[in-house]
Amino acid sequence: MACLDGIIVGVMKKLVTELSNINTDGEPDEHELAEQIRACVKDCGYELTEVNEDKPWGSYFRFCDDDTERFLEEFFPGQIVNDNISASKEAGLNAKLLLVSPEQGLSWQYHDRRSEIWSFLTAGGYRRSTTDKQGELREVHRGDVVQFAAGERHRLVGRDGGYTLVAEIWQHTNPADPSDEEDIVRLIDDYSRLSKKAAFKALINQSPKDLLQSAYKSINKHISK
């Protein structure tokens, strides 16, 4: 068993090394970068269940649930107890890698059914706040770890001069009703992807004057057609 454990540890350490050897500086082809990441993951014995290269900000890579504990031990050593992240299946965890294009960013968002923890594999940035108002941009370095509670507003921001690569863990607030890609309330988005919940919230927060002006513009638009 000890020998088997030694093999597993070796595999885990290799993925961090292989990913760190990928050149993310400058403006390399994003598809080629994604292919390199896929190859690293496969070579290190991990399995991907989903890869999405169609995000306007970059790509993400979702890992098989059976690899979550290995992923935790490799990318978040020492964080499991300190940050109340449990490696047990009962905790309801998912592992991902996020690849963010230079100077791009995810939406200013929050999640109702999950908390998140990020480990930066390159330099990058993020914003956070307990209110809908965006927090200040915080620059981070390779090796920095950040955690967000369910409902906490946050935004991942790509660095200037290269791609940002982040290891991410979701912890579901209720494993019986796990979070998914639809569990995103976008408050601000550079790609016009505001969620219905955020749009409705913005609507009800408008003053009567603003509502009348919006209705007037909408009527005029239809009449002009």
Image (spheres, grey):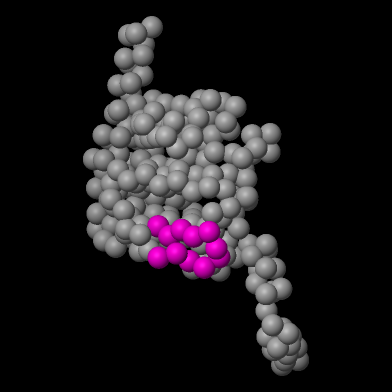
In the depicted structure, whether residue 18 falls above or below residue 88: below
Outermost residue to the top: 1
Is the magenta region chiefly helix, strand or loop?
loop
Q: Residue at x 42, y 26 (%)?
A: 70
Q: In this view, does 150 lie to the left or right of 102?
A: right
Q: Quadrant of the C terminus?
A: bottom right
Of 167 and 101, nearer the camera is: 167
Estimate the x, y position of residue 30 in percent, counting from the top left: 36, 53
Q: Can residue 75 be seen in this view?
A: yes
Estimate the x, y position of residue 114 in percent, counting from the top left: 58, 44
Q: Which residue is drawn at 55% across and 63% down?
A: 131
Of 32 and 81, nearer the camera is: 81
| Residue 151 covered by magenta stretch | no
Estimate the x, y position of residue 49 in percent, counting from the top left: 52, 35
Q: In this view, does 156 lie to the left or right of 24?
A: right
Q: Which residue is drawn at 68% across and 38% down?
A: 177
Estimate the x, y position of residue 214 in percent, counting from the top left: 69, 85
Of 203 and 196, nearer the camera is: 203
Number of marks in picture:
0
| Residue 135 covered by magenta stretch | yes
Q: Is residue 184 left or right of residue 120?
A: right
Q: Which residue is drawn at 37% across and 44% down?
A: 145
Q: Quadrant of the N terminus?
A: top left
Magenta stretch?
126-136
Q: Can residue 218 be seen in this view?
A: no
Of 166 and 99, nearer the camera is: 166
